[in-house]
Amino acid sequence: MEDAKASFQRAIKLNAKDKAPHLSLAKIYFDLGKYVYAALSFSDVIFVDPADVESRYMQGLSYFNADEWGRAAAAWEDLLHYRPDHGLIRVLLPQTYYILAVEYNRLGNPTMGRQSFKNALSINPDTGQWLPGSMAALGKYYREKRMYRQSVAAYQEVIELNPMAADAYMGMGITYWNMDEKQMARSSWERSMSIQPDNNESRGWLILFQQGS
């Protein structure tokens, strides 16, 4: 992987106008979980080929995975100028704006929060398509920030919107595990498995729980 990355970087130095090594480098960074680097490399692809819709999508997704909500929104807004009917963006962009709205409100800026919520509705007024995904993303984000109460609340919101959301129970279980609420974690994973018996991630967490008991 490192040799491949170095080769693509050399190719870019030889000819920065060649789209292929920029794209290959971006994919490597994405697969490695280096999402900001991936987004920057996809930006280089777009500079060479502004009409590359897939790279614009991946640029936004890279920023989204890096919790760079504002940059993700900007990338996907640009994409809509090229593909206004892009189905995924009609779900992911409102999710991003709603996350921004929640964060603006939490940080004491309700004016920006209201505007972000309006932006979400302007892209897709059907909140049922994107609101559960927004709250699930916030649940993971807050857990990574060690804001466990907020994480649990976000996952509970997902479950209220969709009681059969197996992944939300799984995510909430991970949060409880990090809180050292082991029995609550187990109950969440068991509920996830009852909804989706082939959920391997929940099964893995339950095995971990049993080994630690």
Image (spheres, rainbow, N blue to C red):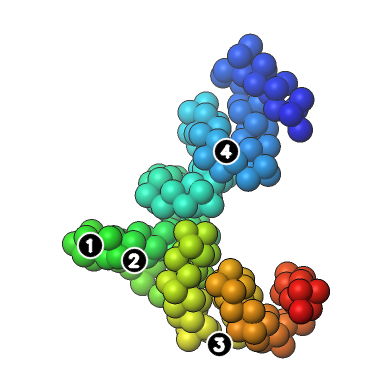
Dot 4: element: helix
Q: Is residue 180 left or right of residue 121?
A: right
- Tag 2: residue type? Val
Q: Which label lies toward us, 2 or 1? A: 1
The residue carrying mark 1 is 108
Above or below 98: residue 19? above
Q: Position of residue 69 (x, y in %)?
A: 41, 52
In the rendered image, which quarter is residue 204 located in?
Answer: bottom right
- The residue that mark 3 highlights is 163
Camera-side residue of 138 and 142: 142
Residue located 76% across and 79% down the image: 213
The residue that appears at 63% across and 38% down in the rendered structure is: 29
Spatial distance from mark 3 to mark 2, Cα to Cα?
Answer: 22 Å
Left or right for 157, reference 109: right
Q: Are circles 1 and 4 on residues that touch, CB within 8 Å?
A: no
Residue plotted at (48% across, 28% down): 47
**Residue type, numbered disc 1:** Gly
Residue drawn at x 55%, y 87% is 163
Q: Earlier in the sequence, mark 2 or mark 1?
A: 2
* Image coords of residue 125 (percent x, y): 36, 72
| Kind of residue sitting beneath label 3 | Pro
Mark 4 or mark 1, which is nearer the start of the sequence? 4
Q: Are marks 3 and 1 in contact (CB under 8 Å)?
A: no
**Gap in angstroms between the C-alphas marked 4 and 3:** 35 Å
Q: Earlier in the sequence, mark 3 or mark 1?
A: 1
Residues at marks 3 and 2 touching, judged by CB atoms closer than 8 Å: no
